[in-house]
Image (spheres, rainbow, N blue to C red):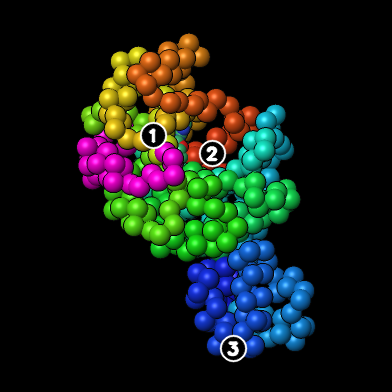
Amino acid sequence: MRNDQTNLHDLPPAELESIVGAVVSPPFRVKQIEEWTHVRGAASFDAMTNLPKDLRADLAARFSVAFPDVVERTEPASDGSQKYLFVLDDGNRIESVYMPMGERTSICLSSQAGCAVGCTFCVTGFFGAGRNLTPGEMLGQFFTIQREHGVPMERMNVVFMGMGEPLLNMEHLETTLDVLYRNVAPKRITVSTSGIIPGIDELAQLDRRPNLAISINAPDRKRREEIMPITKKYPLEELIASLKRYPTEHGREITVEYVLLAGYNDAASDAAALARLIRGLRAKVNAIPFNADPNLPGWMKRPTDAAIDRFVDTLVKNGVAVTVRRSKGREIAAACGQLRGKKEAPRHRRAT
Ligand code: SAH
Ligand code: SF4
C-alpha cells in the first residue's frame, strides 16, 4: 500500500534513533524500535510485541515499516535456488535469488529497477534504465527471503548482483549496508559493479567495506568498449588502477567476473590476456558462462564445456585462482545478475 509516512526501513540506524527519539521516550524504547526494525526486519509495528499497544498504534500513525510484497516465487531448482519477484509501490517489479550453498546461504539482491549501464549481454540492461531502489526496498528483499527460509543470520551471505548497478545508487547502498551490518559481517557482503570508478573509490573510503566484485568481461579495452559501453566513460586502465587502490585487508580478494561468450572472449589467448590484465591485483576470477535470452544478440552463445575448461585451465596455468558459475539457478532461468523483473511494463525511461 502506498503512503507518505516515513518508512523506518529507509533510515540509517543513527537517523532512525533521532527521528523516533524525538517522539518516543524513554530511550530504551527507541533502542527496542531500532532493533525490531534493523535487526529483526519487522514489517509491521504489531510485530514489535514487547512494545505497549498504545505505543505501537502511535508509531503506526506517524511512520511505516513497509517492505515490498512478493508477487511470485519459483519452485526450488535442483540446487535449491529460488527466484523471487517483488512488486514496488509504484508498480515496478524487481527480482532476487535465494541460493542455499551447503553451510552458507546467499541472497542476491537488486539495487535498481532496471539498469542504465546497458551492457549488451545483459537482459536487465536491455530493458533499460529504471529507478534507484530505496534502502527499505533492498532490505525488504533480504529480510523477506531470510525469514521465509528461516536462515540463521550467521549463515548469510549477501551479494548485490541482481538488477541494477549498485554504485549508481550509492547513498541508498551505504544506508542498506549500515543496516545489514547489524546482522551480517562486511566480509560476508559483496557488491558487484560494472566499473563505476568514483563509486569504487567511495566504497574504498568506508570504515566498514563490503567485498568488491568487478565485472571485467573482456580481456582488453577494445572488446570491453564493445560489450560494456561504460568503458568509454571509465577506461579499463583507470578501472584497474582503482581496483588496485581498493583495500583488501585480512586476506580478502576482489572477485573478477568474466562472462564467457563463445568465439568472442573465451580463447586460451584471452585467458592469458586476462591474467596479464589483473596481474598485481589480489583477485580471483569467477567465470560465468553466458546465459542466452531471446532479447539478447543472436551471435552471443554459451561456450562448450571444453572451451570453458580450456579457458579455466589457462588461467590456472597463469597463476590465477578461478571458479566457474556453472549452473546455480539456471533451471529457473535466474542466474543472478541477469534478472529482468519479468512482467514489468516494457521500458522505464527515468534516469538513474
Ligand atoms: N551491475 C552490476 C551487478 C549486476 S550484474 C554488474 O554489472 O556487476 C551481475 C553479473 O551478471 C555481472 O558480472 C554480469 O556481467 C553478469 N551477467 C549479466 N548478464 C549475463 C548473462 N546474460 N549471462 C551471464 N552473466 C551475465
Ligand atoms: Fe547493468 Fe550489470 Fe547488467 Fe551491465 S551487467 S547492464 S551494469 S546490471
Mark 3: give few (<14), some (14-19) or many (20+) Cα within 10 Å.
few
Q: CA distance from mark 3 to mark 1?
A: 48 Å
> Is the Cβ of the residue at disc 3 closer than 8 Å to that at disc 1?
no
- In the picture of the structure, the residue carrying the numbered disc 1 is 283
Mark 2 / mark 3, whichever is N-terminal:
3
Please provide the residue range marked out in magenta: 225-253
Kind of residue indicated by mark 2: Cys
Kind of residue indicated by mark 3: Val
Q: Is mark 2 within 8 Å of ligand 1?
A: yes
> Is the Cβ of the residue at disc 1 closer than 8 Å to that at disc 2?
no
Q: For this view, does 344 lie left or right of residue 50?
A: left
Mark 2: give few (<14), some (14-19) or many (20+) Cα within 10 Å.
many
Q: Secondary structure at mark 1?
A: strand
- In the picture of the structure, the residue carrying the numbered disc 2 is 336
Kind of residue indicated by mark 1: Ala
Q: For this view, does 2 lie left or right of residue 224?
A: right
Q: Return the mark for residue 23.
A: 3
